[in-house]
Image: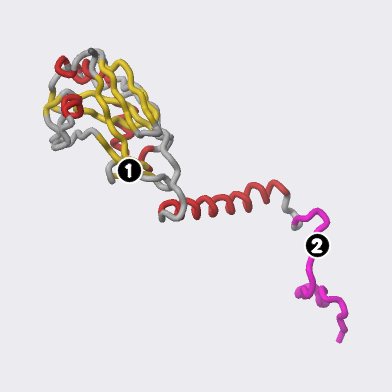
């Protein structure tokens, strides 16, 4: 029977190898492994795990959640072919977003009283409706919660196919008469709340400005 003095050795026949010490590869990598393999696989897995942990800590309130950066985009209401709604939306002069105060200001070119009244459907009632496109950099928007409810594929379809918005935007339909009056007793209130994985829950205020 052979005696082995080395800490690392292979028995006769080559079927069993004993590792009693450490193995050092001259290029720092295992055979058949390149630096690219390490960068694309190991590092990616570590980064994914770390990002997942950070998101969980933010959701648990143990880290400060990311801040939304709201952006506005004009709704192309001609896509849907709704004349009254298109008329109202066309009376929007500008929309400004204050991401520090979380305020969205809609400035009109006519008085709210001059806008068209029509029934929005889905039990929302007959009001002076207009639409604004809003995005917070989350694509798809199905990862975004609006007033506690997650946006769906129907919201994506409405924004992109019916209102001509880019992916990552949703439509906020505004009953201008209610918002101007500060009437929050009905469905179209002058505020809403957004939340997403890793983001801080944030409330936004809608403001309607009429011409002098």
Q: Residue at x 14, y 17 (%)?
A: 113
Q: Is residue 72 above or below residue 64?
A: above
Instruction: Name the image colouring.
Output: secondary structure
Q: For mark 2, does the 10 Å Cα neighbourhood hold few (<14), some (14 to 19), or many (20 or more) residues?
A: few
Which corner quadrant holds the N terminus? bottom right
Which corner quadrant holds the C terminus? top left
Q: Label 1's element?
A: strand
Residue at image mark 1: 145
Q: 204 or 19: which is nearer to us? A: 204
Rendered location of residue 29, percent (x, y): 75, 55
Magenta-highlighted residues: 1-29
Q: Quadrant of residue 196?
A: top left
Task: Indicate which label's residue lies in the foreground, 2 or 1.
Answer: 1
Q: Quadrant of residue 132?
A: top left
Report the side of 29 relative to 64 (left or right). right
Query: Any magenta on residue 60?
Result: no
Q: Main secondary structure of the magenta part?
A: loop
Q: Quadrant of residue 3?
A: bottom right
In the rendered structure, find residue 24 and report the number of the disc placed on it. Answer: 2
Q: Residue furthest bottom?
A: 1
Q: 155 or 68: which is nearer to us? A: 68
Q: Residue at x 59, y 53 (%)?
A: 46
Q: For mark 1, does the 10 Å Cα neighbourhood hold few (<14), some (14 to 19), or many (20 or more) residues?
A: some
């Amino acid at each position: 029977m052979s005696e082995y003095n080395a800490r690392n050795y292979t028995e006769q026949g080559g079927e069993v190898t004993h590792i009693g010490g450490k193995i050092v590869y001259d290029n720092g990598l295992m055979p058949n492994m390149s630096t690219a393999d390490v960068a694309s696989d190991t590092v990616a897995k570590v980064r994914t795990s770390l990002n997942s942990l950070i998101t969980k800590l933010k959701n648990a309130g143990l880290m400060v959640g990311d801040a939304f950066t709201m952006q506005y985009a004009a709704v192309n209401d001609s896509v849907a072919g709704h004349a009254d709604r298109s008329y109202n939306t066309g009376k929007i002069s500008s929309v400004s977003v204050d991401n520090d105060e979380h305020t969205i200001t809609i400035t009109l070119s006519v008085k709210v009283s001059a806008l068209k009244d029509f029934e929005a459907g889905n039990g929302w009632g007959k009001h002076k409706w207009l639409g604004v496109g809003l995005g917070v950099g989350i694509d798809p928007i199905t990862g975004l919660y609006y007033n506690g409810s997650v946006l769906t594929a129907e919201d994506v379809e409405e924004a992109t196919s019916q209102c001509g918005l880019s992916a990552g935007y949703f439509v906020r339909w505004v009953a201008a008469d209610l918002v101007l009056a500060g009437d929050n007793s009905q469905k179209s209130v002058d505020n809403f709340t957004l939340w997403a994985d890793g983001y801080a829950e944030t409330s936004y205020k809608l403001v309607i400005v009429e011409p002098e």
